[in-house]
Amino acid sequence: MPTKLEVKKVFNKGIYTENPVLIQVVGICSALAVTNRMMNSLIMGIALTFVTAFTSLTVSTLKSHTPKHIRMMIQVLIISSYVIIVDIFLKAYMPEMSAALGPYVGLIITNCIIMGRAEGFALSNAPTISFLDGIGVGVGYTIVLMAISLVRELFGFGTIFNIAIMPEGFTSWTFMVMPPSAFFILACITWFANNQIIKKNKEGVEKK
Amino acid sequence: MIDIHPVVIFIAAIFTSNMIFSNFLGMCSFIAVSKEIPTAIGLGIAVTVVLTFTTILNYFVYWYILDPLGLEYLMYIVFILVIAAYVQLLEMILERYLPNLYYALGIFLPLITVNCAILGVSLFMVTRQYNFSQTIGFAVGSGMGWLLAITAMAGIRSKLSNNEIPEGLRGTPITLIITGIMALAFIGFSGMVQIQ
C-alpha cells in the first residue's frame, strides 16, 4: 500500500507540477473541443479520469505478463475497452450528453494523456499508486477544462451550468462560442502557468 | 445532410470545417511538429495518405461488417486496430520497396497512429452518414486541410523564431494564439459552403 506522503506527491504532480494540459501540453484536442459548456467539460473530465485511472491500473497489473514489443497494441486495446464502457454508459443514462459530445468520446482513445501515463508511470509502478496517479492526472485535466469553459460559457451564453448568471439584456458574445476563443483562452492560461514557472525558477536561483 | 456533392464536401473539409481550426483534431502533433517547414510538409503528406486510406477501409469495415452484424459499439476498438495495422503495414511496404521515402517519412509513421485527426475523420464519417464518394471527398479534403494548416503554421513559426517574444509566451502559448488568429481568418470562408 502506498503511504500518505506518496499519495500526496502523486496528486500534487498530476494537478500542479506536471499538469497534463498546461505543462506537458498533451490531450488538448478534446480540451478545446468540448469546452463551450461547463457541463460538457465536467462529464468529459470525469470520463477521462475514469479511463486513465482504470487503464493505469490494468496496465500496471498486467505489466509482468505483457511482451515488450506488443505492449503498445495491448495498451490501445485496454484503453478502447474502457472508452466503449464510457460510451455505452453515456448513451444509456445521458443520451443528450452523449449527443453533445459526439465523436469526442471516442477520441478519448487517442488522447495522449492516457497512453503517456500508462507508458511513463504504470509500467514501472505498483497497481494502487498507478490508479491514484491516473486519478490525479484526470483531475488536473478536468480543472483546466473547467477553467476554459467557465469563461466561454459565461460570456458566450451568459450562464454557468445552464443557470443564468448575467443580467437580463446581456448580449452574449458569439465569439466565445466559436472555436478561436478556445485557442486564445488556453493560450492565456498556459501563458500564466509559464510565468509562474519562470518566477519560481528565478526565486530558486536567487536563494542559491 | 446526405445529399451534398462530394466536391462540396472536399472544399468544405479544407476551408470551412478544417480539422484543426474548427474541430481541434490533431492538435498534439500540430503543435509539436510545426517548427520547420520541411518536417511539417512531411508529416502533413503522411497524415493525408494514411487518413485517406484508413477512412476508406473503415467505411467498408463499418457498413459491410459491423453494421449488418449489429456490432456498432465495437466501432472504436475496430477503427483504432485498422489504423494501427495499416500504419504498420505501410511502414513495412515502404521500407521494402521505397527506402528513400521510408527514411524521409519513417519517424512520422508511429506518431500517426495516435493522431486524433485520423480516428476523428473515421468517426465523423460514421456519425454524418456519408456515402462512399462523399467519404472519399471528406477524407482527402480533411487530410489536405491538415497539411495546409501545419505548413502555414510552420512558415509563420520559422519567421517568428527571429523575433523577440515575452518569455512566458514562448513555445506553446504563442503557437496557440497564432492558431487562434488563423482560425479567425478561416472563419472568413464560412459563408462559402457549409457541411455542419
Image (cartoon, grey):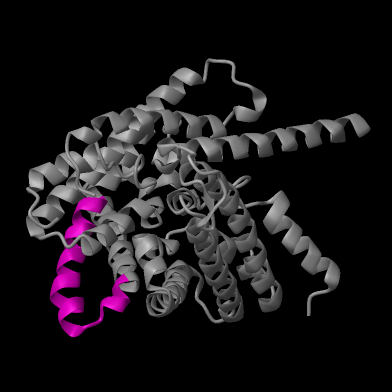
Q: Position of residue A76 (x, y in %)?
A: 43, 69
Q: Position of residue B65 (x, y in %)?
A: 17, 77
Q: Is residue B32 visible?
A: no
Q: Is residue B30 left or right of residue B151?
A: right
Q: From this viewpoint, which residue is outermost toward the top?
A: B163
Residue at 46% across, 71% down: A79
Q: Position of residue A176 (x, y in %)?
A: 45, 39
Q: Quadrant of residue A77?
A: bottom left
Residue in front for this viewpoint, B23 or A120: B23
Residue at 17% across, 34% down: B192
Q: Is residue A199 above or below residue A104?
A: above
Residue in front for this viewpoint, B130 or A4: B130
Q: Position of residue B74 (x, y in %)?
A: 31, 77
Residue at 59% across, 28% down: B170
Q: Is residue A155 above or below residue B66?
A: above
Q: Is residue A109 visible?
A: yes
Q: From this viewpoint, which residue is outermost toward the bottom?
A: B69
The quadrant of the image that shows the N terminus of chain B is bottom left
Q: Which residues are magenta?
A: B50-75
Q: From this viewpoint, which residue is outermost toward the right?
A: A207
Q: Is residue A47 left or right of residue B101?
A: right
Q: Is residue A41 above or below residue A89?
A: above
Residue in front for this viewpoint, A120 or A194: A194
Secondary structure that dominates the magenta span: helix
Is residue A157 inside the magenta stretch?
A: no
Q: Is residue A200 above or below residue A19?
A: above
Is residue B70 inside the magenta stretch?
A: yes
